[in-house]
Image (cartoon, helix red, strand yellow):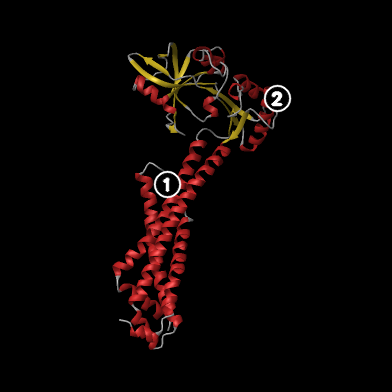
Amino acid sequence: MKLKRIFRTAWEGLMLNKVRSFLTTLGVIIGVASVIVMMAVSAGAEASIAEQINALGANLIIVSPMRGVPGAGRTLLIDDAYAIEEQVVGISGISAEQSPPAQNIRAGGTTLEAIAVVGTTADFPEVRDYAVADGRYFTAEEDDRKAKVVVLGSGIAADLFGEESPVGQTITIGTTKATVIGVMESKGLVADVDYDGRIYLPIELIFQKFITSSPMGKDAVRTIYLKAESPEKIESVIAQTSSLLAERHDVDPAKPDFTVQTQQDIISTQEATTAAFRDLLAWVAGISLLVGGIGIMNIMLVSVTERTREIGLRQALGARASTVLTQFLIESIILSLAGGLVGVLLGIGGSYLFGALGTMRTQLVPLSIPLAFGAATVVGVFFGYYPATQAAKLDPIEALRRE
């Protein structure tokens, strides 16, 4: 029998019970759509993490105390930042940062409670790619002489002064009065940090007024950010910085009490975390496809049982066992391919819809489409082969005797 005729016969067999055929494909539809949507969720999460980390600044190198090392929290000092600035070649800026406890802020009749205060050095805007929208940032000279000046995040400026420009106004931070000299541009939430809800002070003023006592030391800093002049100089800057700090801290360079990371290092670490999440999603989607395949096999076995007399009659009229096997295998493949096609469409639509309506970002992975569709094809062949062989093995005489 010609292949075209076999396809037509298989199609007619499926159309004998349209509802059952549709319900059989549901498992494959759900499985294929799940693969596409879940890979889109995983890719979206990785892209969001990378964007947030890159938003911290370009060519950024991050120096921080080594966690888990006794005394490491006290070893990264503001003098380390100044030494790096003077001795390391290939950096265009350096920003040391320290955050005291949150403070209440007052201006006029408005009071804001528990506002994040960040002490930085003068290069902060350049190093962190964070521009000043109104006024200016404080200078290195103002930092050295502990000038009582403050730069506001855009959200804080709006809460305290509304539409009025805050530049030149005086606010009270805890018990310290400071003059507003600038307002940062709106940056929003980056890596769970609300940059618009913070204020920025000279770090030397932070040491003098806001860190009266600390087990880490009054001049300890939380993080030092370096901006390399170009991507090509990042490795050189890392090597110089690591060597300098190891010497200053009198530690073995192989066992430092600090860490030096790039943005890519952090992104790679986060990607390793999301990889486990992606694998879990892949297993869930794979199980959905497996369930869909079992459904196809089950229905095809029922179909073979119901059409036993038809199979016996066709064999009696000259149909070969291979023809019967091919027919039922094609029926199974048609079911899986139909489910795969609908699943792909639902997966693509679901990815965009999930991203638009949900809180998590989604990013469609083009590779997931042929992967999911190919998996559906394999499911149809694998789970359809056994019912097809059972149909081909039927004895024509015994088949015609069945009711």
- Answer above or below: position of 27 versus 50: below
Q: Nearer the viewer, residue 355 or 389?
A: 389
- Answer above or below: position of 105 versus 281: above
Residue at image position (49%, 40%) is: 49
Residue flagged by tag 1: what amino acid is it? Thr
Residue 194 x, y percent position in the rendering: 43, 29
Residue flagged by tag 2: what amino acid is it? Glu
- Left or right, 224 with respect to 360, comes to right
Residue at image position (44%, 77%) is: 325
Q: How many angstroms separate mark 2 from mark 1 (CA)?
A: 46 Å
| Circles 2 and 1: CB atoms closer than 8 Å | no
Q: Quadrant of residue 176?
A: top left
Residue holding disc 2: 247
Residue 47 x, y percent position in the rendering: 48, 43
For residue 362, the mark is 1
SS under mark 2: helix
- Answer above or below: position of 298 versus 158: below
